[in-house]
Amino acid sequence: MSDGDARIFDSNEALSRADGDRELLSELMEMYLVQSKEDIGEIEAAIARKDAKRLEFVAHSLKGASATIAAEQVREQAYRMEKIGASGNLAEAPALLRQLKESINITNELVSKAIAKFRSGTEGRP
């Protein structure tokens, strides 16, 4: 994993947050793959409906899930989206949504690769 990838998703940090439990982390990452896609759909719908409270709630959820698995870029963007929802001014939300979708796609690719490595037992080995 390159330094740039680690800023997006840091599998070593994620493993540390899971107290070194590869199986637990794999399960959390699999749930993240599903939930992040659902959350981005909910965020998109909240923006379309101009539902600031729902936007704030779902972005907060995505932020927490992203922090759990050390997906820093998505966590940061979800935090910004949460703040937009809290403010009630959704003018910047569509542009941030585009960035968030791209970040989730990249993150989920990296997470999928990490799951495969953890399951094969090759993560962290030379």
Image: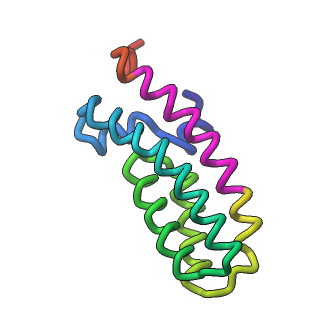
Residue 76 magenta: no
Give the vertical position of 18 relative to 93 (above or below): above
In front here: 1 or 54? Answer: 54
Which portion, as a residue range, is magenta? 99-117
Outermost residue toward the bottom?
Answer: 88
In front here: 24 or 124? Answer: 24
> Residue 87's quadrant in the figure?
bottom right
> Residue 43's quadrant in the figure?
bottom right
Give the vertical position of 3 relative to 34 (above or below): above
| Residue 119: percent from left, percent from top | 35, 20
> Residue 108's quadrant in the figure?
top right
Q: How is the image coloured?
A: rainbow
Tell me what residue is drawn at x 50 percent, y 30 percent.
112
Tell me what residue is drawn at x 64 percent, y 67 percent.
45
| Residue 30: percent from left, percent from top | 41, 37
| Residue 105: percent from left, percent from top | 63, 42
